[in-house]
Amino acid sequence: MGPLPRTLELFYDVLSPYSWLSFEVLCRYQNIWNINLRLQPSLIAGIMKDSGNKPPALLPRKAQYLASDINLLRQHLQVPIQLPKDLFSVLLEKGSLSAMRFLTAVNLEHPEMLEKVSRELWMRIWSRDEDISEPQSILTAAKKAGMSAEQARGLLEKISTPTVKNKLKETTEAACKYGAFGLPVTVAHMDGQTHMLFGSDRMELLAYLLGEKWMGPVPPAVNARL
């Protein structure tokens, strides 16, 4: 038997484009690095409020940089990411509360579907400039990810239940306790120690911590194009 996989937690919100980048790279490496990847749907608005942070798009210079940064990252990471036309409406008005509650319900009842449903919600908002806040939008994303209509409707009916709401709150608070001030946050548990890494650009450092080889965002063993 080989060594047991190390556990990595990825705290993410589909409202965060950089969370999508971390998600895809970690999904590509989870077997290469022998890691147990635990996806942790969280609410970025709660983390920002708890830490006193503000969305980068509120600062004009950061918003301008964001556009060029996303364009370069789309090519480098081979993820079809692009900014929505009305970025402020998406980030500051619509938000992601219903979507993240839905993903929390998926994680509670159908965890095997969490990766695919998360990816489809990111595809909607950050690739096709489609809505993720309306119930029908969430159902469409779930069905496109392979979930049955009955399963999706059943989960959607539960997003306002105390069980789901409390679980999302607990996961968000866990990220805050690790020191999160935004998302994505990757938490590595190894050798009795915990390491919190912020952002999608810490993968080379993560490889160093794991004692693994970093082969770029698209490792040779993976056909990464979505």
Image (cartoon, rainbow, N blue to C red):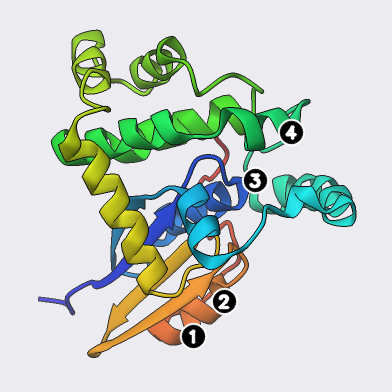
Which residue position is annotated with label 2?
204
- Distance of mark 2 from mark 4, alpha carbons? 30 Å
The residue tagged with tag 3: helix, strand or loop?
loop
| Nearer the observer, 200 or 49 | 49
Above or below, 83 relative to 221 = above
Mark 1 and mark 2 in contact (Cβ < 8 Å)?
yes
Nearer the observer, disc 2 or disc 4? 4
Point 76% across, 48% down: residue: 57
Left or right: 140 as drawn, with respect to 166: right
If you read the primary sequence from the N terminus, does the residue marked by circle 4 or circle 1 appear first? 4
Residue 224, image x, y percentages: 53, 45
Amino acid found under the numbered disc labelled 2: Glu
Amino acid found under the numbered disc labelled 1: Tyr
Nearer the observer, disc 4 or disc 1? 4
Residue 101, image x, y percentages: 33, 35
The image quarter containing residue 178 is bottom left
- Distance of mark 2 from mark 3, alpha carbons? 17 Å
Left or right: 73 as drawn, with respect to 101: right
Which residue position is annotated with label 1?
208
- Distance of mark 2 from mark 1, alpha carbons? 6 Å
| Nearer the observer, 180 or 126 | 180
Callout count: 4
Which residue position is annotated with label 3?
78
Which residue position is annotated with label 4?
87
Residue 175, image x, y percentages: 38, 64
Point 88% across, 50% down: residue: 60
If you read the primary sequence from the N terminus, does the residue marked by circle 3 or circle 4 appear first? 3
